[in-house]
Amino acid sequence: MMSTDMEQSMHDFKQGMGMMMREAPATMAAFDGFMNSALCNGALDTKTKELIGLGMAITARCVYCIGIHVNKVLHAGGTHAEIIDVCQVAIVMGGGPAMTYIAEVKKALIRPVLSVIVR
């Protein structure tokens, strides 16, 4: 079966992260700790934080980030409807350019690649 663009993006992301973990382990450990701390339950739950991250990824036009956050939203119990709501807000904030990145959200929803990015 041929991989989707999003699967390829997530594979490429994993390869890049693997290289950084080998070449700069202390930096990557610090980055990983920061990410885990910032996205764990606090005043906002993890799902809400991941939904916010998805909206920001769309407006930042980051294909890798979109794939990661769609998958993490789903892993945290988020729904398709919640993701669509986030897409709408991202379009409000990012306009037409953000709208074009909704295609990346669709790719991530078609075939989630959780095993690539969720620990």
Image (spheres, rainbow, N blue to C red):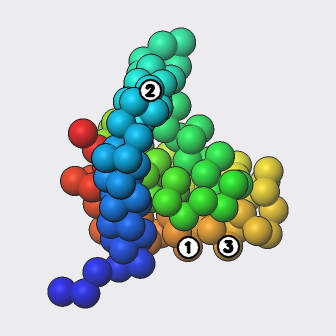
Does residue 46 appear anywhere in the picture? no
- How many residues crowd mark 3 within 10 Å: few (<14), some (14–19), many (20+)? few
Q: Depth check: 64 or 98 in front? A: 64
Which is in the foreground here, disc 3 or disc 2? 2
- Give the x, y percent position of residue 57: 61, 51
- Give the x, y percent position of residue 69: 46, 48
Residue contact at pointers 1 and 3, CB within 8 angstroms: yes
Does residue 54 appear anywhere in the picture? yes
- Residue 30 is tagged as 2
**Amino acid identity at mark 1:** Ala
**Amino acid identity at mark 3:** Thr
**Location of the N terminus (image quadrant):** bottom left
Against 66, residue 24 (above or below) is above
Q: Residue furthest bottom?
A: 2
Against 70, residue 106 (above or below) is below
| Residue matched to label 1 | 103
* Left or right placement of residue 108 versus residue 93 in this view: left
- Give the x, y percent position of residue 68: 43, 52
- How many residues crowd mark 2 within 10 Å: few (<14), some (14–19), many (20+)? few
- Residue 100 is tagged as 3
**Amino acid identity at mark 2:** Ala
Q: Depth check: 56 or 18 in front? A: 18
| Separation of marks 2 and 1 at Cα, in angstroms | 32 Å
**Location of the C terminus (image quadrant):** top left
- Residue 32 is tagged as none
Q: Quadrant of residue 25?
A: top left
